[in-house]
Image (cartoon, helix red, strand yellow):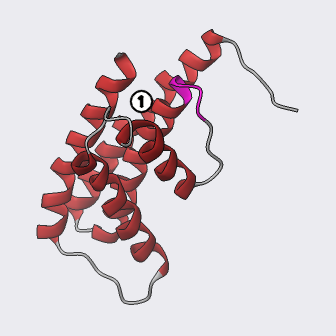
Amino acid sequence: MKQTIDEESINGLVVYRIQRSKETMAEAKLMIDEGYLNGAINRLYYACYYIVIALLIKNGISSQTHAGAKQMLGLHFVVTGKLSPKTSSIFATLFEKRHSSDYDDFTYYDKDTLEKLYPQADEFIQTIEKLIET
C-alpha cells in the first residue's frame, strides 16, 4: 500500500533537504580546508544527493537507493530537457568518486581535485534549487 503525505509535509521535507544540502556543503568546505579530502568527497556527494532528493520529493518522484535517485534525475529531468547532461554529470562524477572513496582501498584525492569539485557541486546545487523553485 502506497502511503501519501500532505502538501505541507512535502514542502517541509523539501525545505529540510535543501537545508541539509547547504549544511553539508559547509562541512565539505571545512574538511577541504583541514585536509580531510576523502571525507570532503563524501560530503560533496551527499550535499548534491540531498538537493536531488528535495527535487524528487517536490515532484512526487520516489527513489529507494542512491543509484535510483541518479536514475530518476536522468529520467525525469535530463531526458525531458529540464536539466542539462553536463550539469547532471557533476552528480554522476561525485556519485562515482564518493563510492570509490568510501569503499575502494588506497583511493586518495588531492586538494586540486577538491578545489575543482567544490565549485561544481555548488553550481549543481544552485541549479537544482532553481528547478525546485519553478
Nearer-the-camera pick, 72 or 47:
72
**The furthest residue to the bottom:** 106
When asked about the image quadrant of residue 107, the answer is bottom left
Rendered position, 37 above or below 63: below
Q: Residue at x 23, y 68 (%)?
A: 35
Q: Residue at x 31, y 44 (%)?
A: 25
Report x, y in % for residue 66: 54, 55
Report x, y in % for residue 51: 41, 37
Q: What's the amino acid at mark 1?
A: Gln
Report x, y in % for residue 5: 72, 19
When asked about the image quadrant of residue 57, the answer is top right
Nearer-the-camera pick, 96 or 27:
96
Give the left or right position of residue 43, taking residue 31 as reference: right
Give the left or right position of residue 43, taking residue 75 as reference: left
Q: Residue at x 16, y 48 (%)?
A: 119
Rendered position, 40 above or below 52: below
Q: Does dot 1 land on a helix, a strand or a loop?
A: helix
Query: Is 126 colored magenta in this rendering?
Result: no
Please state, as top left, top right, bottom left or bottom right, where the C terminus lies in the image.
top left
The number of numbered badges drawn on the structure is: 1
Give the left or right position of residue 11, taking residue 62 as reference: left
**The furthest residue to the front:** 80
Q: Residue at x 62, y 11 (%)?
A: 7
Please state, as top left, top right, bottom left or bottom right, where the N terminus lies in the image.
top right
Give the left or right position of residue 16, taking residue 41 as reference: right
Range drawn in magenta: 57-61
Query: Is 59 colored magenta in this rendering?
Result: yes
Q: Which residue is mark 1?
A: 19
Rendered position, 45 above or below 133: below
**The furthest residue to the right:** 1
Report x, y in % for residue 91: 34, 53
